[in-house]
Image: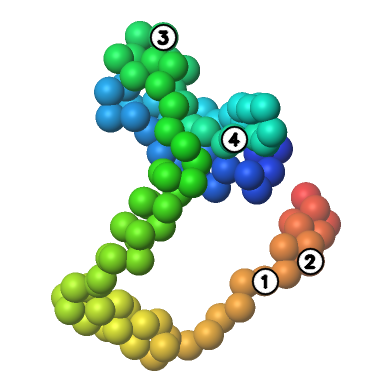
Amino acid sequence: MRKNIGNDFALRGFVCYANCGVPLRSSWSTGKTRRYAYYLCQTKSCASYGKSIARDKIEGEIGALIKSLQPTKQLLTLAKAMLETLGNRPYHPAPDSAQTGLRRAHSI
């Protein structure tokens, strides 16, 4: 995924068309009075090639889906058990990597 994607398209690289499984691209289109944000498929072999979805529509629908997700009771029980197990373990901080590297260098 590109590093310079900015904040304009939160789902770029994460959402794929079902037809091809390739992540959607994002772009801006310029109308007469304003710019419009879209996600689109640019895979030429895909049945959805060139089709676009308005950014606000797809991001709104995925946001609503995420808000509707609820963890199961089994998942919460498992998470609680994992945290309790971690909480009962003694804490051993990792050694300072710089100091460890220097000791290894001196021992060579």
Q: Nearer the viewer, residue 61 or 5?
A: 61
Q: Position of residue 52 (x, y in %)?
A: 44, 27
Q: Residue under circle 1?
A: 95
On the rendered image, what quadrant is the N terminus found in?
top right
Of marks 4 and 1, the one in the foreground? 4
Of marks 3 and 4, the one in the foreground? 4
SS class, disc 3? loop
Task: Identify residue type, mark 3.
Answer: Lys
> Can the viewer see residue 24 in this picture?
no
Query: Mark 1 to mark 3: distance in Å?
Result: 51 Å
Sequence-wise first label, 2 or 4:
4
Q: Residue under circle 2?
A: 99
Q: Residues within 10 Å of mark 4 (few under 14, many from 20)?
A: few
Task: Identify residue type, mark 2.
Answer: Gln
Question: In the drawing, does residue 29 fall left or right of residue 70?
Answer: right
Q: Residue under circle 4?
A: 36
| Image height of 100 relative to 105, above or below | below
Query: Mark 2 to mark 3: distance in Å?
Result: 53 Å
Q: Residue at x 28, y 65 (%)?
A: 69
Q: Nearer the viewer, residue 83 or 44?
A: 44
The quadrant holding residue 49 is top left
Q: Residues within 10 Å of mark 3 (few under 14, many from 20)?
A: few
Query: Mark 3 to mark 4: distance in Å?
Result: 23 Å
Q: Residue under circle 3?
A: 44
